[in-house]
Image (tube, rainbow, N blue to C red):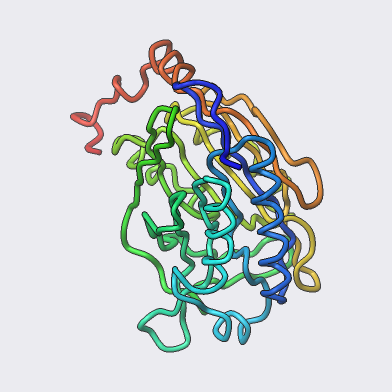
Amino acid sequence: MTAAQTSDRVLRAACAQMNSRDDVAENVRVAVGLVEAAADRGASLVALPETWAFKGVREGILATAEAPDGPSNAAVAAAASRRGMWLLAGSIYEPSPLPDRVYNTSVLFDPNGTARAVYRKIHLFDVVSGDVAYEESRDVAPGEELVTADVAVPGAAALRLGLTICYDLRFPELYRALALRGAAVLCVPAAFTAHTGAAHWDVLVRARAVENTCFVLAPDQVGEHLPGRSCHGQSCIVDPWGAVLARVDDGVGVCVADIDLARLAEVRTQVPSLANRRPDVYGT
C-alpha cells in the first residue's frame, strides 16, 4: 500500500512517540509498528523521536552506535519504503572520529530507502533539569552544519524540511537560518525531559512555528527510560499560526496532520515577518 495524499497542495505527516529503552531490537520492533500505523492513517512522511533506537547508560551509547545507514535505521527505512513513505529517522548514536564520543545523528530517507540528508545535533544538552544533571557533551561530539532537505511525493507539492534535534529548540537563530534557507517545515525529534518539557515544550515548539511562519513536526520520547530520567511526550504537529493540529497526549503512538502549503502561503501573506526583517540594523 502506498501512502495517500489529499491534494497537490497537501502532504500528510506523522509524528511517532516512543518510550525507547536499552533494548535496540525491541525499540526497532516498536518503531516499525509506528511507521506502519502512520502509513495506515495516510501519512507520506513519518518522523521518529530523538535517540529512538537506544536510550540507556553511557557504555550502551558507545556500544550501540551505528552508521547512518546501519541496521536500525535500515530496518525502519525499509518499513517506510514498503509503504511508499519518507522517513525522518529521529536520531541515532553514530560513531565519530573522536575517542569515546559519538554523534547524535538524524537521517532522512526517501521512499526508496535511500538516505537523502544527514544532520548531526549542533547544541548539546549540558543542563541541570530539576535535580538531575545532564552532560551530553561527555558522550556526544557536536555537529557543525545546518541541513535542509527537499521532500517530494507524487501528487503533492514539494516542500523543504529544516532538520534539528531536541535541545536545538532553545536556539531560535538556528530556526531562523533554516527558514531563510527555504524551510517550510521545521523538524524537532526530541527526548525532552519531563521537568523542562512541562514548562517549556509547548511554548517553544509553537514559538518556532510562529516566529518563522513554518510548520513544525515535533516527535518526542515519553516516560521513564532510566531510573529518575523521564521524557515529557506530547509529540505534536503545529501550523504556521501556532495552532496544534495533532498531538499524542500520552503513551506510545502516532499523531497525523496535513501540511497544507496553501495555509503556509496564507499565513506568510497575513504576517510577512520573514520579508519584513531588518538585517541592515541588527546584522543577521
Name which residue lies at 67% across and 49% down.
Answer: 36
Asked if residue 106 is positioned above or below residue 12 in the image, the reply reads: below
Task: Identify the residue at horizontal 50%, vertical 55% (top origin).
Answer: 165
Residue 83 at what x, y percent from top left?
58, 47
Extreme residue toward the front, this view: 1
Q: Quadrant of the N terminus?
A: top right
Residue 235 placement: quadrant: top right
Nearer to the camera, 277 or 101: 101
Indicate left or right for 67 with 251 as reference.
left
Q: Is residue 88 above or below residue 216?
A: below
Instruction: Give above or below for 270 relative to 39.
Output: above
Work out which residue is located at the far top of the displayed protein and give it: 270
Q: Position of residue 259 (x, y in %)?
A: 52, 28
Q: Which corner quadrant of the image does residue 255 belong to?
A: top right
Left or right of 76, for residue 155: left
Q: How many marks?
A: 0
Tell whether 18 sits left or right of 83.
Answer: right
Q: Quadrant of the C terminus?
A: top left
User: Which of the 4 image quadrants contains residue 160?
Assistant: top left
Coordinates of residue 237 in the picture (x, y in percent): 61, 35
Q: Residue at x 49, y 47 (%)?
A: 86
- The residue drawn where x is 50% and y is 23% is 260
Please provide percent x and percent y for residue 170.
51, 48
